[in-house]
Image (cartoon, rainbow, N blue to C red):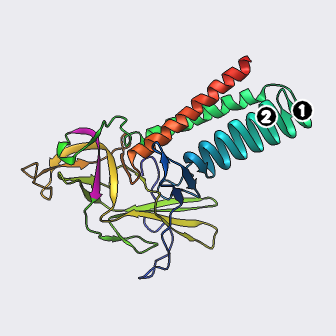
Amino acid sequence: MAGQDVAAPGEMGEYEAPAESPLRSSSYEYRSRLKIGSLPLIHVVRGIDPSTGARPPAIGVIAVGQVAIGVIAVGQLAVGGIALGQAAIGLGWGIGQLAVGLLAAGQVAAGALGSLGQVALGPQALGLIVDHSSWAAVAWLIGGLVLLGWLMRRIAAVGPIVGKGTGDLLRISSLRDGRARVAGKVISRNQLRAPLSNRPCVYWHSLRVGPGIRAQERAGADMIVADGSGTARVDLSGAVMFIRNDRYTELPAPDWSLYMETFLAQGDDLYVAGPVRLEPDAEGHPMYRPGGVAPVFRGDERHPVVITTQPPYQLGAELKLAFGMAVSLLIAALISAVI
């Protein structure tokens, strides 16, 4: 993974899956098929993204997760029009242990119009401890700035997939030297076995997390993707940012750590973005580019190849919602401070 240490072989532990592993792959997230625009009506996320080791946010019209951003957001940290959570930052209603909103209710509640809680902050406050200062504006300002900071990091990670620096989605037959993005299907044969699930694959990524433990391991040299116009090779030995969170396998260990695994297999649909060059390739598809020359995606530390199974329009819609929410919080803070 780009910018992350990769554990040496064997560092993940001694576990070996049996020939037919009893472990079952499952999704750590749910996106409803019903959408409003490009956003899912409901997006539910739990746990850790096995491909990045991070706790991904739930972003949707109704978002539920440890971190949730939505019109209605529910989570440990929730940001939305209506927010419910341990820390809830709402533009309208905020309900939680620490709650912010036009109207807020919680143990500590800061409301621009009204608040109810053990500690109530705002012009119309009801609580054991009351302060009539405009704390909601301060919380909105901090929340907006933090959300913008996260958004910048997220764009740096997935920007190539949504077209930042790579332009429109191209057919593989149209690729030239530079940076680009394509959609295709894995056609390489499965020559590996994922270590936990024992599933056949062309690439796997394992993560072990726990108290004082964070180790990663991966396997796979390259893979071939095709889109009907031709084929391209993806060099997996270079800098790669792999984002797959729709299928994974996990195994708890006796030391309270957790083993997680995700993988790519023959037939998977995916999106690839990053640096690409035309290179001699005896195995390249000659249909459109004679002479044994084929495009090769190969990343470096500055510009890794980004591989994901998530559609670019979906990622783009999530980024736009997060940006809109951050700007709305900043505007609300400004208006509240002025009034």
Locate the C terminus by quadrant.
top right
| Residue, disc 2 | 110
Out of 220 and 14, give the one closest to the viewer.
220
Q: Residues within 10 Å of mark 2 (few under 14, many from 20)?
A: many
Q: Of the residues under marks 2 and 1, which one precedes in the sequence?
A: 2
Residue lying at 53% horizontally and 58% vertically, measured from the top left: 29
Magenta-colored span: 177-185
The percent position of residue 221, horizontal first and vertical second, equals: 30, 60
For the residues marked 2 and 1, what is the alpha-carbon distance in whole angstroms? 10 Å
Measuring 34% from the left and 44% from the top, which residue is drawn there?
A: 300
- Residue 182 highlighted magenta (yes or no): yes
Q: Residue 124: where, in percent of width, then height?
A: 85, 29
> Residue, x 13% and y 56% (percent of image)?
285
Q: Amino acid at mark 2?
A: Ala
Q: Secondary structure at mark 2?
A: strand
Amino acid at pointer 1:
Val
Mark 1 secondary-structure assignment: strand
Across and down, in percent, residue 35 comes to 48, 48
* Majority secondary structure in the magenta region: strand
Decide which of 82, 337 is in the foreground and name it: 82
Residue that sits furthest to the right in the current view: 128
Determine crowd level at label 1: few under 14, some 14-19, many 20+ residues with C-alpha closer than 10 A: some
* Relative to 48, residue 113 above or below: above
Label disc, if present, on residue 130 of the rendered structure: 1
